[in-house]
Image (cartoon, rainbow, N blue to C red):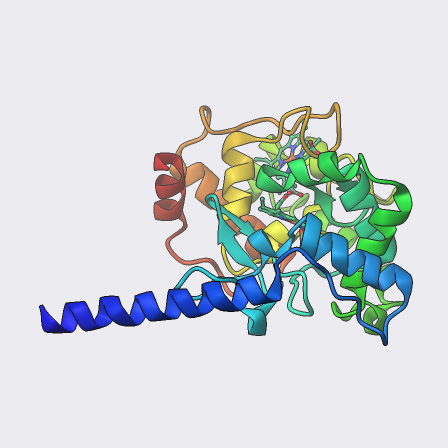
Amino acid sequence: CWRMSRIRANIWAACSRIRRRSSRAKPGRYVPVATRDAAWNRGAYLAEGISHCGACHTPRGALGAERKDKAYAGAAIDNWIAPPLDKTNPAPIAWNQAELVAYLGTGVSLYHGTAAGPMAAVPRGLAHLPGSDVAAIATYFTSFNGSAARAGQDAALIQKALATDRVGTGLQYDAGTRLFTAACASCHYNGGKGLNPLRPDLALNSTVHLDDPTNLIRVILYGIDAKDGAPGVVMPAFGTGFTNADVARIAAYLRATRTTKAAWPDLEQKVATIRAT
Ligand code: HEC
Ligand code: HEC
């Protein structure tokens, strides 16, 4: 009992400290950074003060506050993964200014797919702002996400992605390949003609590169309806037709053929858990 009351007292003291600090800091009042230009400051103000991108993309500490030392390092939110928006973002092609402007402004980008799940509402909200504001948010994120250092690599990465898409077309005897070819390739195969942003190239999509397969599994099970992502197009839901083993097999196949990362463990169990939530 004594230990419990001490712990409670400590938590209470920590909470009051945070409350006092945040009332002094006046949350929501943005203090411009003098060394940055107007567009960067506008972007930081919109991202942090208004849209609050960190509410989903920044991991939280034990008391539920966003961890300042891990700003935009990615976090789990509402049974989805909000990917990292800093240098640790796993997408092969960097999130440069043009990709961020397209994704945030319209919900669909050429190289990174579409905004699904809890992210789908964000481009719909940003659509009410002038284009210069969306550009300012992109300016803010590209100032720390390492995209400038990766400029010039896109052409080679696209060729690599198109080549991995062709792998499998001759491997019809493998169960994962067969399932993917039958269920997914009709829409997601990007032959030699380049990329179609309305049918995201999966080798370039963060869902297959993240450490956690949740987003990929959710998209396969529940699809993306016409109002989310790219307006008017639909990614069908496979949850009713596919068993947990089918979904796990496709996820494992994409991980193995589209990335060089370690296989996801316990995939079938993960699919079952996601269905149950
Ligand atoms: C309500 C939670 C939420 C908020 C608020 C939010 N995001 Fe997201 N974001 C997500 C989720 C979940 C995903 C994954 C969506 C998917 O896989 O399609 C995502 C995906 C993204 C991606 C794609 C990352 C990748 O590698 O595929 C970018 C870029 C992004 N968000 C930027 C932002 C910015 C900038 C803001 C603020 C203007 C913001 N987000 C606000 C939840 C959120
Ligand atoms: C009828 C065409 C069609 C089929 C079949 C299809 N997809 Fe899609 N897929 C789409 C479209 C269109 C989008 C973009 C959706 C949007 O923006 O609303 C998409 C998006 C995606 C995304 C990107 C999600 C994101 O957050 O960027 C993934 C991953 C995906 N599909 C995986 C699959 C897998 C795996 C299969 C097979 C089980 C499959 N798709 C079958 C049309 C299809």
Across the whole image, how many numbered discs are drawn on residues? 0
User: In this orientation, which residue lies closer to the viewer: 32 or 171?
Assistant: 32
Percent coordinates x, y for residue 16 in the rendering: 40, 66
Ligand 2 quadrant in view: top right
Say which residue appears at 86% left-offset and 71% top-offset. 36
Does residue 211 appear to the left or right of 51 in the view shown? left
Say which residue appears at 78% left-offset and 49% top-offset. 111
User: In this orientation, which residue lies closer to the viewer: 160 or 228?
Assistant: 228
* Quarter of the rendering containing residue 110: top right
Say which residue appears at 65% left-offset and 47% top-offset. 168
- Is residue 111 something that shows in the picture? yes
Percent coordinates x, y for residue 224 in the rendering: 62, 31
Tell me: residue 168, above or below residue 160. Answer: above
* Quarter of the rendering containing residue 137: bottom right
Does residue 104 appear to the left or right of 215 in the view shown? right
Does residue 82 appear to the left or right of 153 in the view shown? left
Percent coordinates x, y for residue 222 in the rendering: 52, 31
In the rendered image, the quadrant that contains the C terminus is top left
* Quarter of the rendering containing residue 155: bottom right
Does residue 65 appear to the left or right of 257 in the view shown? left
- Is residue 62 something that shows in the picture? no
User: In this orientation, which residue lies closer to the viewer: 73 or 240?
Assistant: 73
Percent coordinates x, y for residue 141 in the rendering: 76, 62
In the rendered image, the quadrant that contains the N terminus is bottom left
User: In this orientation, which residue lies closer to the viewer: 119 or 230?
Assistant: 119
